[in-house]
Amino acid sequence: MDHRRRVPRTDVVLADPRLEAAAARLGRGAIKAAVIAAQERARAGEIAPEEVADAAVAALPAGMRAVHNATGVVLHTNLGRAALSAAAIEAVVTAAGSTDVELDLGTGRRARRGRDALGALAAAVPDAGGVHVVNNGAAALVLTATALAAGREIVVSRGEMVEIGDGFRLPELLESTGARLREVGTTNRTSVADYTAAITPDTGFVLKVHPSNFVVRGFTSAAGIAELAGAVTVPVVADIGSGLLRPDPLLPDEPDAATTLRAGADLVVASGDKLLGGPQAGLLLGAAPLVERLRRHPLARALRVDKLTLAALHATVTGPVTPTWQALRTDPELLRERTERLRDDVGAGEVVPSVAVVGGGGAPDLELPSWALALPERYAAPLRQGDPPVAGRVERGRLLLDLRCVGAGHDAAVAGAIRAVLQDGD
């Protein structure tokens, strides 16, 4: 009998409970396309007719998957940087429906977009006369450069011309706005006099960039914000990078918005998804007239954030401590105990000292003492591809699973993923 006659009809395959359940999430069109593709594979002899439903299920688009971050990198860029708090996640779910993002429920009239998030940000940094939010840190800098220096000059130290990741470089980003860069000083030393000598009527602003993803040591010097603010007559813009709103004793070398503004910066730009522990966003805080000028610029419309980001940012700023804050401060002894329980649970591996890092281009010098479960390197890929995926780091031929960034309530899920991989390996 021709095996093609045994290929099940489309309606029969679509009645599979797994595909019916997926249709509510992905839509019937996507499910039917997967079924038809699986039927064609069966007709071509690539799979058996009875495997059509399984093949259709396997081919369904998965979208982004939740991953357990066992890398020991708190703000892992490839894993989306900061994990949102439970409060922020709940706020995002609520905001996914119809919300009062631009509506005053009392008057029924249009209200300022994101006023709750902006109000919370302003309250958290009272030194900022005005606040605004765009879709990421680079966008905040682009908006600033476009509004204040398009066709003009930005004075910046050569030692602060950084690459911000994925091949994107600060000079190219700024020049794309139509601004010209006036580089001053040297790689390792830039003085206030270097800046003041470069100021002309064509200067849009002076830019200070915190080199958050590298460290220069030795014969170095840099002009501080307070020195510059007292010496130049143009706006001083500080890109602090990490998104700290206030000083953090754990991160003494990371600048924060409040301190930077008090030192005299006219405008601070920062990221919301790094040390702040919130959603991807670009924060602009500073002198009210300056921020309002940026907010009213036509480009601000193209860079604005959606209601989900505003909801998550508000909950992050006003809510409980974030997973990022907790991960940075987790007691190494508690990590050792959790790791030992994980080892005993899976019946394999060795508990070894580990060093975790901040990641996300922040605090490159800070090492966080930690512990990890060491397994053979060959388990790294199966764990990443498992259900649920577990991402560790490979170091010196071993897979290290550091629980610092794994919520304690998820240890059982990680253990189950490890056991599944170990059984398949046997």
Image: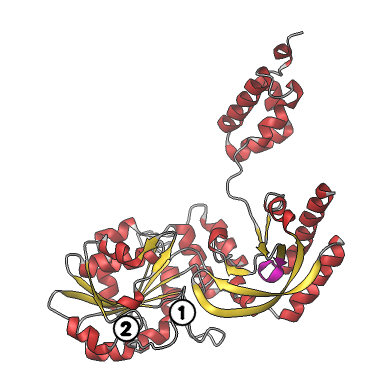
In this rendering, position of residue 102 left or right of residue 250: left
Q: Quadrant of residue 24?
A: top right
Residue 406 belongs to the span the image colors magenta: yes
Classify the position of the N terminus by image quarter: top right
Residue named by callout 1: 215
Q: Residue at x 63, y 79 (%)?
A: 368
Residue 337 lies left or right of residue 270; in this view the side is right
Labels 1 and 2 touching (C-beta < 8 A) = no
* Tag 2: amino acid: Ala
Q: Does residue 196 lie above or below 412 as drawn?
A: below
Q: Identify the residue under disc 2.
A: 265
Compared to 332, does 98 lie above or below? Answer: above
The color scheme shown is secondary structure
Residue appearing at x 81%, y 47% in the figure? 424
Q: Is residue 200 left or right of residue 293?
A: left
Q: Position of residue 380 (x, y in %)?
A: 70, 56
Asked if residue 322 can be seen in this view, the reply is no
Find the magenta span and give its range.
Answer: 401-407
Give the number of marks: 2
